[in-house]
Image: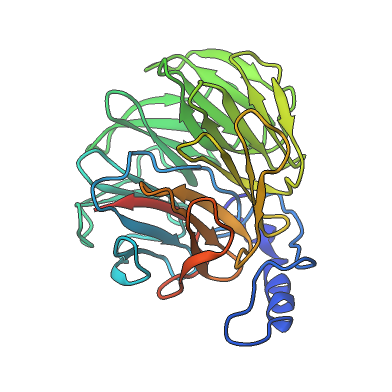
Amino acid sequence: MKISDFSRYALIASVAVAMLAGCVGSQPTIGAPGATPQMQTKQTAAGRKRSQSRPLEAPPTNPNLYVANPGNNTVAVYLRGTPSLLRTIYKGISGPAALAVGKAGYLYVANANNNTVTEYPPGKTSLLRTISHGIKDPDAFAFDGFRNLYVANFSANTVTVYVEGQTKVLRTISQDMHGPEALAFDNSGNLYVANGNGHTVTVYTAYGSTLLQTISKGVSAPVALAFDSSGNLYVANYGNNTVTVYGGGSVPLRTISQRVVGPRALAFDSSGNLYVANYGDNTVTVYAPDKTSVLRTITSYVAGPDALVLGSAGNLFVSNFLSNIVTVYYPEKTLPKYLIHQGVSKPYALTFGP
């Protein structure tokens, strides 16, 4: 589930060809039954997973959509509520694996192919600064309560921490870390790390680096983390096709497995419904709060979903790695509101910003 390992994504081309061969007409329904990509364990530019299950900041007023495109090494920005390409960011970008927008609107891009994090001013395409110290195969971002930036470095088995707007490492967290792929904070500020290679979720003290807990029961190649409004932890397990739920301990409260196939991303809507991007069978499945059975399934124009975000109006945005499309759905609907094609190439991460 990594961007930098090209051997992990060898099947994508053949899968894409097979899907295209079955399409008829100018607007085929992508993600029909039978078009099922095989699971992989570590990927190339854009295939490994979706380590961020939602925007790291609440969407700003009138937010535009940002899309990371490893296929053409860009971040494309789309005008709020439309498929119109507003601007394209090129400088410093190589294998973009994660996006984050800070409090003041500065954009951060994790570049897995050149081991950097690049920063851009709000609403601009010019490169402001580059972070390289301590960065190796960056895969996910998070901000703590003091606005420090956390970067998961998959190949280095570390999380490095930076004061926002600076390039010097503030501290490095590494104890019992094995291929960190996703980061999340609980309400107490404790850091949770999904270790894709270690089959664990490790928990560290708020604003520190001491290991508090290791969660392994039910965890298999975890690739995404999310907390619900009650503070329960949800873990997307790519290795065993489940989402496991924890209530503060190391034993699952429940396990969601119905229609979960190669889960890559998690998100919650304002009603507490859980959305799961299933890369393995080209679906997004939705589950009511505290339930394990499927509430509804989205298949129309879904092909290799690897990132999900929900807008302020409740619209669902899905990046489809296999079809080079971002699909947008009305709340509680399964047919697209509109499709975004222009500038999209192997879309891998989504967020909102100015």
Q: Nearer the viewer, residue 135 or 41?
A: 41
Q: Nearer the viewer, residue 157 or 267?
A: 267
215 in relation to 114, above or below: above
Please report the residue visible at 65 percent of the width from the left and 71 percent of the height from the top.
30
Q: How many marks?
A: 0
Q: Position of residue 109 (x, y in %)?
A: 36, 51
The answer to whether residue 155 is left or right of residue 127 is right
Q: Nearer the viewer, residue 94 or 202?
A: 202
Please report the residue visible at 48 percent of the width from the left and 40 percent of the height from the top.
269
Give the residue at the far right of this rendering: 34
| Quadrant in the rendering for residue 134 | top left
Q: Position of residue 142 (x, y in %)?
A: 40, 35
Give the residue at the far bottom of this rendering: 25
Q: Work out whether residue 157 can be spotted.
A: no
Q: Work out whether residue 249 can be spotted.
A: yes
Please report the residue visible at 19 percent of the width from the left and 41 percent of the height from the top.
104
Q: Nearer the viewer, residue 83 or 348?
A: 83
Q: Position of residue 118 (x, y in %)?
A: 31, 51
Please report the residue visible at 63 percent of the width from the left and 21 percent of the height from the top.
246
8 in relation to 314, above or below: below
347 in relation to 267, above or below: below
Q: Position of residue 123 (x, y in %)?
A: 20, 57
Display colour scheme: rainbow
